[in-house]
Image: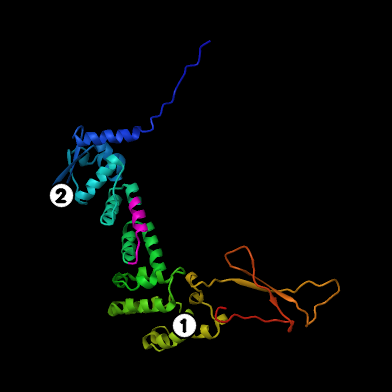
Amino acid sequence: MATAQRSLDFYHGIHSTALLQGLQELRSENLLVDVTLCVSGQEIPCHRNVLAACSGYFRAMFCNGHLESKEHKVTIQEASVGLVQLLVDYAYTSKVTITEDNAVELMEGASFFQVPPVSDACTKFLSDSLSVKNCLKMVNFGGRLNPNLETKALTYAMKEFASVSKIPEFLDMTKEQLLKLISSDDLNAPEETVYMAVLKWINHDTRKRKKEMRELMELVRFPFMDRMYFMEKVEMDKVIRKCCPDIVSEARKYQAFPGEVQSPRTRPRRASGLREAVVVIGGTERFAMGEKPSVESNSIVMTHSSAPSSASWVSMSRIKRTNDFWIGWCSFGHK
């Protein structure tokens, strides 16, 4: 009877690290290198297999029969020598230093040369570095290269809209970018601020932007403006009255009769602290069998509320009454 042979599945945990170190040493000593990248007159010796394993760009260049796959020197014209050096160093060391000065260029380069880990790291770095001064630049940059960065930058701009609307870059936004901001329920700013920001954007280039006024003003939620401000700054503005008479009329009616006017502009933004809710009012305290509540009884009105998006109900304060048996309710001023 044959005896079972012993076996051992050996795994050297640091082999990949040691392999990279060995390749880096070979590169440093110019050993076994088989391609030289020529960038802005400078030469960077490399190994094709390392570049192809790390970069989708170089994999396509060296593995699909392109002319460069057989040449010893390859000219790179799409990037600076500093950027290419950073990415080559990353390929051999798995390390790269991202700074405020190089993050944008490095992200562009990582996207172009198809090095996702570096691109993702730059996205996180830039997202974590968002400020009032740079968020609109990141909106533009993300729009070209990284939707995730664009979304985070837009979210930041919405949160800090009052301050963002005062920086010079705000006036250079495209109409589409401004529409994204002011149409959002998450915009964190009083409607008076939104209105003035839109006017400022239009007046920055009135000849070209005046035609956009109607579309932009449709997204300002005039019903939630301070009543005196609305009367003095909006109703008295001849241009607004001529361009948006129905919007002005709607806001006026809403402020007088809130429950009778419904439109996208009468929905409060989430940042306002107001929430849509269904409120159920009714019920009385329990009485003994055969006993009926009288007009004078201290019966209790039960109130419950639920957000339309929620499947649960929340108990609100009970209302004690001692007079009228029938009770009517209405909302006034969102209260």
Q: Mark 1 highlights which residue?
A: 226
Question: Where in the figure is residue 186, as x and y percent of width and height?
Answer: 45, 68
- Label 2 secondary element: loop
The reply to whether residue 245 is visible in this rendering is: no
Eyeballing the image, is 286 above or below 146? below
Q: Is residue 97 left or right of residue 297?
A: left
Tell me which amino acid carries mark 1: Asp
Q: Which residue lies furthest to the left in this view?
A: 41
Mark 1 or 2, nearer chain start: 2
Q: Is residue 225 left or right of residue 280?
A: left
Q: Which image quadrant is residue 165 in?
A: bottom left
Main SS type for the magenta part?
helix
Tell me which amino acid carries mark 2: Ser
Q: Is residue 250 left or right of residue 89?
A: right
Disc 1 and disc 2: Cα gap in Å? Answer: 60 Å
Residue under the image location 35 percent in, 79 percent down: 199
The label on residue 198 is none
Q: Is residue 124 magenta?
A: yes
The reply to whether residue 270 is visible in this rendering is: yes
- Label 1 secondary element: loop
Q: Mark 2 highlights which residue?
A: 40
Q: Which of 332 and 110 is in front in this view?
A: 332
Question: Where in the figure is residue 164, as x and y percent of width and height?
Answer: 35, 70
Eyeballing the image, is 280 above or below 54? below
Q: Does the magenta stretch include residue 17?
A: no
Residue under the image location 44 percent in, 88 percent down: 231
The magenta segment is 121-132
- Label 1 or label 2, whichever lies nearer to me, is 1
Question: Where in the figure is residue 130, as x and y percent of width and height?
Answer: 35, 61
Question: Where in the figure is residue 101, as x and y percent of width and height?
Answer: 25, 56
